[in-house]
Amino acid sequence: MSYAALSGKKIILGITGSIAAYKAAALTRLLVREGAVVKVIMTPSATNFISPLTLSTLSRHEVQTQVMEEGSWNNHVALGLWADCMLIAPLTANTLSSMAAGACDNLLLAVYLSARCPVFVAPAMDEDMWHHPSTNRNLSRISADGVKIIPVGHGELASGLTGEGRMAEPEDITAFLQQFFAEGQSLKGKKVLITAGPTYEPLDPVRFIGNRSSGKMGLSLAEAAMARGAAVTVVLGPVHLPETKSGPEVIRVGTAVEMFHAVEAHFGEADIIIFAAAVADYRPEMPAEQKIKRKGDELMVRLVPNPDIAAQMGQRKNYRQLTIGFALETENELQHARDKMAKKNLDMIVLNSLRDPGAGFESDTNKITIIPAGNKAEEYQLKSKSAVAEDIWNSILQHFGDRL
Ligand code: PMT
């Protein structure tokens, strides 16, 4: 990690009304010590927990709490544009729900809605509040909007209970930001092409052969690559695409043949190509023009092979392009994955097995083994697909960074 990563970075520190607000003083001091320029915004209730005077002294900037202050207007849009990042620490359940709903009844929320920079939150709440389904829902909502959530700690809580929900320590929050800014440059200037989701191969106008891929793994890889500065194009099969504030370029396709043509059209300009889609290997040779009617005891459908997109691109790639595939296996996993990597001329293959609970299709988690060509397999624990995406990018950069 680069310890100069925060030097000169302009940070808006938003503080909400939680007992953990006392840690904002140490956090401000740390960020300033790392070279960041910090401007503090407090919600009105945060001022009950820590004095604006303490924070203006430590940040060396006036603290702002209201949209209108003594006859003058705080320009939330200008503040949002000024910052390299906004950090809300501590984040209460109340402000979290306002962010998820897009509410705007104080300066902090107005700046949040106007900010074009990355936004980080460090939640702080009691364990039961932290585990409440509505907290979960609101966190998923803001996470889909692109907000980065700094994991909570475990320990003594203000209620006197011990458990999950403590705000991360100022050192950990600072390290999280440092890592983000250091990684933020790691794919700068690179073009990434990703396939994601299933393909649907029509049998007739209403039926198809498909699979349960949700596109989550590929879209997590896309989001992580964008956060590292890459220009990302996703060729996405027929799945619901979550609305995000600033997502990758998405090309929608239905069938494997359509996916092949879309990949072919963008392959030449891509530096790194990841095949995360679950592509049907076969399609009905002659989809019926009208809905197939039930008649007789059996129905024969002749299937013909689809193009193997990864294999064909593996033949066409030049010396500076990296191709990375996935292997979804159910038995003899490592051997099948290595065979696929060789057959498709991949630089790396990511194995996920349907024998591992929580891995593969649909879930928000995955458990992977990364096999870089010519190297030992690297096994990972079950993690969220976003965390898995970070592991994959870290491994790509570790093994092939010098080729990029
Ligand atoms: O989308 P999610 O619900 O998040 O699930 C993620 C996932 C399980 C789909 C993903 O992690 C994954 O494993 N994707 C690849 C699934 C697959 O089809 O694996 P395969 O072993 O059949 O194919 C091997 C590789 O060749 C894959 O990179 C695949 O994209 C590619 N392929 C396969 C067939 C084909 N005709 N063209 C291809 O490009």
Image (cartoon, grey):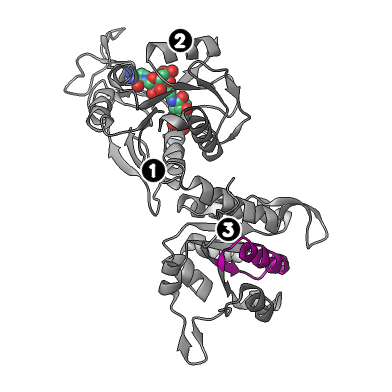
- At label 1, which amino acid type do we have? Ala
Q: Quadrant of the C terminus?
A: top left
Query: Which amino acid, mark 3?
Result: Val
Q: Position of residue 396 (x, y in %)?
A: 48, 30
Cα separation between marks 2 and 3: 43 Å
Q: Which residue is mark 2?
A: 339
Q: Residue at x 26, y 11 (%)?
A: 304
Task: Determine the secondary structure under disc 2.
Answer: helix
Instruction: Name which of mark 1 and mark 2 comes first in the sequence.
Output: 1
Query: x%, y% of residue 223?
Result: 44, 43
**Up-down relation of residue 341 to residue 117 (above or below):** above
Residue indicated by mark 1: 230
Choose the circle earlier in sequence order: 2 or 3: 3
Residue to which mark 3 is pinned: 121
Residue under the point 47% across and 50% down: 144
Distance from the alpha carbon under mark 1 to that under mark 2: 30 Å
In the image, residue 315 sits, relative to residue 264, either above or below, namely: above
Which residue appears at 34% of the width and 20% of the height? 310
Note whether ligand 1 is within 8 Å of mark 3.
Answer: no
| Front label number (1 vs 3) | 1
Name the quadrant where ligand 1 sits.
top left
Helix, strand or loop for disc 1:
loop
Mark 2 crowdedness (10 Å alpha carbons): few <14, some 14-19, many ≥20:
few
Quarter holding residue 54: bottom right
